[in-house]
Amino acid sequence: MPLAQILEQYISLGIFVLAAGLSVLSFLAWRRERDVRMRIVTLGYAMFAVYGLIVFLEYLLLPYFPNATLELLEHGSAILILAGLLAFFIALTRD
């Protein structure tokens, strides 16, 4: 596996672990405070975690799925980043 793929895979795993952890912490804060903004932040972090998981699993799933399908899934999942950023913006601007 080339260095670029290894780097992408490890960074994606890091994104998944960090975003999943922050999502859990945000969820616990939401349960304690019942603030709607924390629920939105939890959703934003969850979207980042799903994106990291998809990119991490891409190379592990290559033997089972066509390359074109996995590339489409990886590049299409970037919309989760956009949606997560939008969720953070909504949480910041909410009263």
Image: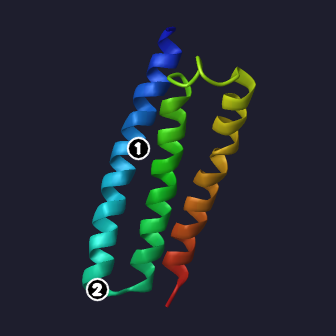
Q: Amino acid at mark 1?
A: Phe
- Looking at the image, which residue is at 44% across and 84% down? 36
On screen, residue 67 above or below 17: above
Return the residue found at the far front.
64
Task: Give the labeled residue for mark 1.
Answer: 16
Residue 76 percent across, percent down from the top left: 70, 43
Return the residue found at the far bottom.
95
Q: Gap between marks 1 and 2, in whole Å? A: 25 Å
Q: Secondary structure at mark 1?
A: helix
- Looking at the image, which residue is at 64% across and 45% down? 77
Residue 50 percent across, percent down from the top left: 50, 49
Residue 18 percent across, percent down from the top left: 34, 47
Local crowd size for mark 2, using a 10 Å CA cut-off: few (<14), some (14–19), many (≥20):
few
Q: Earlier in the sequence, mark 1 or mark 2?
A: 1
Residue 54 percent across, percent down from the top left: 54, 39
On screen, residue 75 above or below 18: above
Q: Secondary structure at mark 2?
A: helix
Where residue 84 sits, quadrant-wise, is bottom right
Where residue 33 sits, quadrant-wise, is bottom left
- Total marks shown come to 2
On screen, residue 56 above or below 82: above
Residue 8 disc label: none
Horizontally, residue 63 falls left or right of residue 11, namely right
